Image (spheres, rainbow, N blue to C red):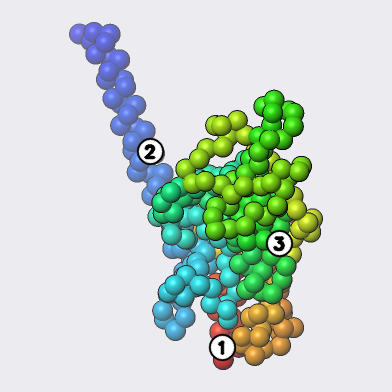
Amino acid sequence: MRLPTWLAQHLAALRALLVFTALLGLAYPLALVAAGHLPGLDAKADGSFVAVDGRTVGSALIGQSFTDADGNPVPRYFQSRPSAAGDGYDPTSTAASNLGPESVVDTLATDPAESTESLLTQVCARSLTVGRLDGVDGRRPYCTTDGVGAVLAVFRADGLTGQVTRVVSVNQAAPATPFVATYQGVPVELAQPGTDYVAEGAVVTPVRGDAPAEPAVPADAVTASGSGLDPHISPAYAEIQVARVARERGADPAAVRRLVAEHTNGRALGFLGAPGVNVLELNLALDQRFAAR
């Protein structure tokens, strides 16, 4: 007896569902689990945990912060790059901030708790913090001396052109002092929380300032990675931290630099990506070689 066409089609779809469920839902995952337990791969499959004296202290593949209970950097350790994953390096919330190059205007609310910082202001603030911590110049182009984005809302007589009639420093509110007193002869005002100057017709105008073209603080020290879990920093970021770490541990900076070199990974396959310093492994090596004072 020949089955009706509609029933035959449904049975064929059911068979396909069962076959692909068995292949992709059972066989494939089990094959990957088995491959992960092959010699040489088992450590990576288990998370590449790093243990000291039988105690797990982290993973070589997932970054972590080296801060105190108040979130302040612990000076005797090399610091990781910023993280936007949860409260920082949270594997269950791996993510980026999703802020891009056009994020230059902060949201200043009447309630400070509701204010949000642009990517530019986050970068400026982090750069100043790293500069103070490591004794280097923390200035960056388009940043104010107090660590916010140097951005003006410029009003002109004819909209986008014409004489400047009003200027507001959109990322600075009272009691701050405008980072420039005047712009094209017009006094610069402080921003009023809750005001959308772009909606009122202003032109957003970043001001470069006199910061060096090549900042002393590297980019990875002020920006988070796409995953928020990157365990590495650049050799350039490690270099500006050497003097601080050596001072805190009473060690020779040259010896600390040698440790950094020992924990620097080269490019993948010799040409992919950039060299990186594994921060957890480096800090563990420091604890073994140079006990903190």
Residue 167, compared with residue 89, is above or below; it is above
Residue mark closest to the camera, 1 vs 2: 1
Indicate the position of residue 37 as horizontal and vertical percent values: 45, 60
Residue type for callout 1: Ala
Q: Considering the numbered disc 3 on the image, is that residue within a helix, a strand or a loop?
A: loop
For label 2, the SS is helix
User: Residue 139's mark?
Assistant: 3
Quadrant of the rendered image containing residue 291: bottom right
Front position in the image: 267 or 90: 90
Q: Is residue 103 visible?
A: yes
Residue shown at 28% from the left, 25% from the top: 14
Q: Which residue is mark 1?
A: 292
Q: Which residue is mark 2?
A: 23
Q: How many residues crowd around disc 3 within 10 Å: few (fewer than 14), some, or many (20 or more)?
A: many
Q: Quadrant of the C terminus?
A: bottom right
Residue 247: percent from left, percent from top: 66, 86
Gap between marks 1 and 2 measured at Cα: 54 Å
In the rendered structure, which amino acid carries the disc numbered 3?
Answer: Arg
Look at the numbered discs 2 and 3 and tell me whether their residues touch, using CB distance below 8 Å: no
- For the residues labelled 2 and 3, the Cα–Cα distance comes to 56 Å
Under tag 1, what secondary structure? Answer: loop
Residue 52: give x, y in percent of width and height: 47, 80
